Image: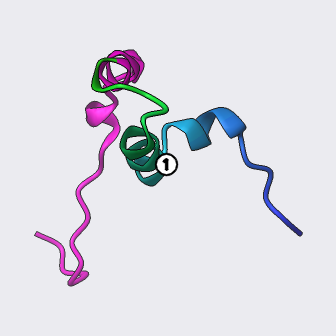
Amino acid sequence: MAKKVNPELLKLDKRILSRRLLSGEISEKDLQSLLKKIPDVAENAEEVNPDGNEK
């Protein structure tokens, strides 16, 4: 079963934005404007220990 993909999220994908910048579809100014709209969710981050050991 295929996952449903939100087309709006694809516009913000790092690789797609890079390609759009290179092709001239968007400008650096447009990109900065988009980035300002993205909320900062750093407080939702959780530290993960790749070794699996508790600190």
Q: Position of residue 4 (x, y in %)?
A: 80, 51
Q: Quadrant of the N terminus?
A: bottom right
- Residue closest to the eye, 53 or 24: 24
- Residue closest to the eye, 52 or 11: 11
Circle 1 residue: 16
| Residue 50 magenta | yes
Q: Residue at x 18, y 73 (%)?
A: 54
Q: Residue at x 79, y 59 (%)?
A: 3
Q: Which region shows up in magenta? A: 30-55
| Displayed quadrant of residue 32 | top left
Asked which colour scheme the image uses, the reply is rainbow
Position of 38 relative to 13 (above/below): above
Q: Position of residue 44 (x, y in %)?
A: 34, 37
Q: Looking at numbered disc 1 in the image, what kind of residue is underneath it?
A: Ile
Quick one: SS at disc 1?
A: helix
Q: Residue at x 46, y 41 (%)?
A: 20
Position of 34 relative to 46 (above/below): above
| Residue 34 magenta | yes
Residue 5 left/right relative to 38: right
